[in-house]
């Protein structure tokens, strides 16, 4: 699949009230000033949901249901919407749209040779209703400033490529070393007969970082041949707000190569028991509970 060609411009979001309404094609609604944008907050990462933000500068309208079709994903849909848009809501409304499963071909998870984020437009089909009329399908351009609909399948396909070679997990305990540092362990279980996998880099998170360096690379990863990599950590920041509002600090960014091809980063979750112990370690080490 040519990911550059099939990026956001290939996205189609359909709000499908029209299918059940014979008046759809004959509606006399005249609208303009419709804008759309795709976004994704950190709180949506784990649930694999994006927000379609829709604004309307003209008449007040209602959105009813949505189907998302994007190159790189299977189709997904949401219905039962009753979301009003119009000039009285200048910020628009955010329609949560679940992402389908990533559709991965050979090499789709590999790091791009010429990565480039863009704000190219997506085509979005909106079915809207206006009081006194049936449903009308509108085509508008929707931007994706952070290029999430290109990044997400790349990460998903990288995770799938690595999973075909080895299972990567974080041990479900945190060892407090008593000197202001603690230790996690990344475990690597090769898939019998699978391709060769090698950990190239492990990055810090918003909650913890490497105790004696910026990231885990080179000699810090030499033990991976034994099936595990010890991660000696310190708190990234002693900030109670960061700890309380954390959404991604227990997803560890791992860069790996599969049969010599470096993949996009994948994110290995810290198990619940280890997450609780990690938060206790940070709270204790930073004196946040005092």
Image (cartoon, rainbow, N blue to C red):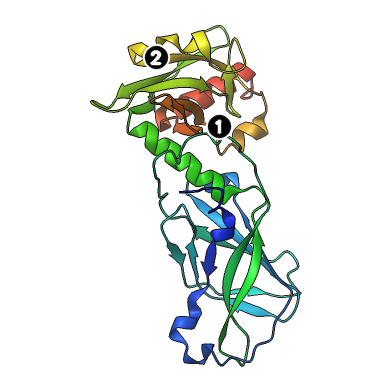
Residue indicated by mark 1 = 249
Q: Is residue 238 above or below residue 31?
A: above
- Residue 136: which quarter of the image? bottom right
Q: Is residue 276 visible?
A: no
Q: Is residue 76 above or below residue 221?
A: below
Identity of the residue drawn at 41% across and 31% down: 271
Q: Is residue 285 visible?
A: yes
Going by the picture, which residue comes out furthest to the left? 192
**Secondary structure beneath label 2:** helix
Identity of the residue drawn at 42% across and 24% down: 260
From the viewer's perspective, is 53 left or right of 191? Answer: right
Q: Which of these two is toward me, 280 or 106?
A: 106
* Location of residue 4 in the rendering, given as x and y in whole percent from the top left corner: 56, 48
* Location of residue 101 in the rendering, given as x and y in whole percent from the top left corner: 40, 51
Q: Which of these two is toward me, 278 or 22?
A: 22
Instruction: Name the image quarter holding the C terminus.
Output: top right
Residue indicated by mark 2 = 224
């Amino acid at each position: 699949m040519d990911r550059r060609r099939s990026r956001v411009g290939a996205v189609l979001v359909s709000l499908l009230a029209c299918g059940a309404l014979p008046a759809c094609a004959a509606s006399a609604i005249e609208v303009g000033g419709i804008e759309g944008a795709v976004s994704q907050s950190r709180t949506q990462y784990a649930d694999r949901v994006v927000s379609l933000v829709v604004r309307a500068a003209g008449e007040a309208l209602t959105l009813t249901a949505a189907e998302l079709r994007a190159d790189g994903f299977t189709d997904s849909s949401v219905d039962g919407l009753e979301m009003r848009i119009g000039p009285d809501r200048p910020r628009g409304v955010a329609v949560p749209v679940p992402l389908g499963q990533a559709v991965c071909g050979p090499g789709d998870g590999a790091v791009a040779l010429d990565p480039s984020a863009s704000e190219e437009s997506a085509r979005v089909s909106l079915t809207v209703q206006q009081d006194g009329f049936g449903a009308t399908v509108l085509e508008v351009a929707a931007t994706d400033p952070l290029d999430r609909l290109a990044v997400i399948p790349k990460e998903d396909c990288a995770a799938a490529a690595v999973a075909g070679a080895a299972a990567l997990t974080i041990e479900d305990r945190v060892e407090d070393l008593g000197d202001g540092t603690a230790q996690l362990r990344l475990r690597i279980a090769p898939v019998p007969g699978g391709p060769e996998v090698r950990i190239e880099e492990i990055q810090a998170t918003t909650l913890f970082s490497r105790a004696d360096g910026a990231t885990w690379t080179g000699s810090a990863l030499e033990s991976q041949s034994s099936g595990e990599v010890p991660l000696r950590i310190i708190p990234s920041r002693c900030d109670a707000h960061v700890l309380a509002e954390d959404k991604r600090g227990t997803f560890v960014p791992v860069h790996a190569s599969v049969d010599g091809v470096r993949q996009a980063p994948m994110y290995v979750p810290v198990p619940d028991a280890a997450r609780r112990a990690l938060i206790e370690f940070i709270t204790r080490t930073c004196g946040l509970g005092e």
